[in-house]
Image (cartoon, rainbow, N blue to C red):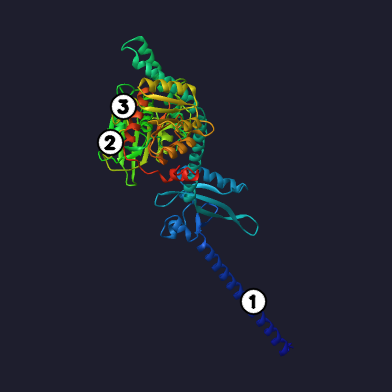
Amino acid sequence: MINLIPLPSALHRIRSRTWALREEVRHRQQTERALRESEARYRSILAATPDDITIADLEGRVLMVSPMALKLWRCERMDQLVGHRIIEFVAPEDRERTLAAIARMFQGELPGPSEYRGLRPDGSLFDVEVNVDFIRDQDGRPANIIMVVRDVTERRRMEAERQQLQAQLQQARKMEGLGSLAGGMAHDMNNVLSAILGMASLYRDQAPEGSGLRQGLETITKAAERGGKMVKSLLSLARQSPAEARELDLNGLLREEVGLLERTVLAQVRLELDLAPDLRTVRGDAAALTHAFMNLCVNAADAMAGEGTLALRTRNLDSGEVEVQVEDAGCGMTAEVMEKALDPFFTTKAVGKGTGLGLSLVYSTVKAHQGRLELWSEPGRGTVVTMRFPARGPAGAAGPDPEAGPGPAQAGLSVLLVDDDDLVLGSTRSILEALGHTVAAVASGEEALARLEAFEPSVVILDLNMPVLGGGGTLLRLRALRPALPVLLSTGRTDQAALDLVAAFPLVTLLSKPFSMKQLQLQLQLAHHDHHQPLGAVHPVGQGLLDVCGLAGA
């Protein structure tokens, strides 16, 4: 007997199964649609990210890369990356470190961001930062390696620039600190040296030629001049602008320097001069630049121990600068020495063989002339010092040498001498009287202004650094009383304040301490010559100072 299933029950089961299949199909369609949408989102994310996202198998072979990888690695096709091993894209010097990091990952240690040198298929190198992790299966076991690779070349460059700027700032602070120390002692020290140099030069010229007395005074004079140069060198560390600026031919300065040194420290050194014939002029202090070049030449000769080639080069740059390069074939410097080479008082020479101020003074001199200095050196390959200065006029446009005076001043000038230091006051007065001038000597600016009420001097020698009213305050009132009276502003510290005063008023010139009898005579010649020239207008700054102090038209 056959049992027949009731028709309504069979239809019900068929309908139920059909409905279940339809639901399964719909669910699968929703899942597939969600997967497609998810895949599209992730592809959009991968396309938008600026980094390369790479997935590799556990053997380190690349399975997939994001679109940015083509740009990062400079590839045209994906097969230039996919299928290759990760280690192929690491610079040879970094491969051992990379493999060690991957080995630590399999031991459970995930490295943080690491930097390597990336090797592109075209052979070029660049800096990359890599973050690495595992893609794990359902059981938590590593299934693939995922890496995020970022190009950090620009970041590295900016960091290097930041470190360079930081080093320059530290160097500037060192110079500022040393300059403040030097400036504090310069005034008193130069007053002492000025008295010694002035009196020694006076009596030296009066002593008979060839006598022991003249030789002794000559030694004292040279010692005082050397002391003055040492103080000036220390002050140069802090100076922000040249003490005496004029148009200069750097080729001429280098030739003069070579002429002085080639019979002494450069006698056994081969010298190569490659000086641009059309070199443009610069504006600067001839003495300071000459001293800087001399330091470099002496250092180069010492580094070569008398054997090797010293090359001096100049050229015009398209940037509007003039370049001076000093290259030696000496022992060179290590990276550690290079880091300290510009520090004040740092030296690798034996005790008593060097002060450690040579390169520091060169650096300060270049900076004071708004220039740039680059130092390159390697052990056994010598040293190259490159200096670049703003160019001024065309070749051959150097200004006249201020040492060439307008001729001897007439004797019998009446001089108002103002200085609060007894040594300077006495020695300068003796020199002036020996030169045939009449001197009224006072110890303060207040006394000088009182004397002017009934005294008409030919020239005033005014000390800048005095108490109470001081040289600056005295000059303001003096210029209001006597607009056309020549003034020699005497100072042992030629700082920006002194330069501003000289620039603000006509017929005011600097007389730097210490000075000899000949130097004082030259300054008097210039002052006497300028006194007979048409009087220029007061600089707006000077006029402003007179207005503020209520002295205009006084």
Question: Residue placed farthest to the front in the image?
Answer: 454
Q: Quadrant of residue 492?
A: top left
Residues at circles 1 and 2 in contact by the CB criterion of under 8 Å: no
Residue 97 rendering spot, x and y as whole percentages: 52, 43
**Which dot, 1 or 3, sits closer to the camera?**
3
Q: Quadrant of residue 455?
A: top left
Q: Report if residue 233 is visible in the image.
A: yes
The three-letter amino acid code for the residue at tag 1 is Glu
The three-letter amino acid code for the residue at tag 3 is Gln
- CA separation, marks 1 and 2? 90 Å
The three-letter amino acid code for the residue at tag 2 is Leu
Q: Is residue 345 above or below residue 199?
A: below
Q: Is residue 127 above or below residue 503?
A: below
**Which dot, 2 or 3, sits closer to the camera?**
3
**Which dot, 1 or 2, sits closer to the camera?**
2
Q: Residues within 10 Å of mark 2 (few under 14, many from 20)?
A: some
Question: Residue placed farthest to the left in the image?
Answer: 277
Question: Residue placed farthest to the top in the image?
Answer: 212
Q: In the structure shown, which secondary structural element does the residue marked by tag 1 occupy? A: helix
Q: Earlier in the sequence, mark 2 or mark 3?
A: 2
Q: Residues within 10 Å of mark 1 (few under 14, many from 20)?
A: few
Q: Is residue 309 above or below residue 129?
A: above
Q: How many marks?
A: 3
Residue 398 rendering spot, x and y as whole percentages: 29, 38
Q: Residues within 10 Å of mark 3 (few under 14, many from 20)?
A: few
Residue at figure coordinates x 55%, y 65% from the top left: 42
Residue 413 rendering spot, x and y as whole percentages: 36, 27
Q: Nearer the viewer, residue 392 or 168?
A: 392
Q: Which mark is residue 410?
A: 3
Q: Report if residue 334 is visible in the image.
A: no
The residue tagged 2 is 275
The residue tagged 1 is 24
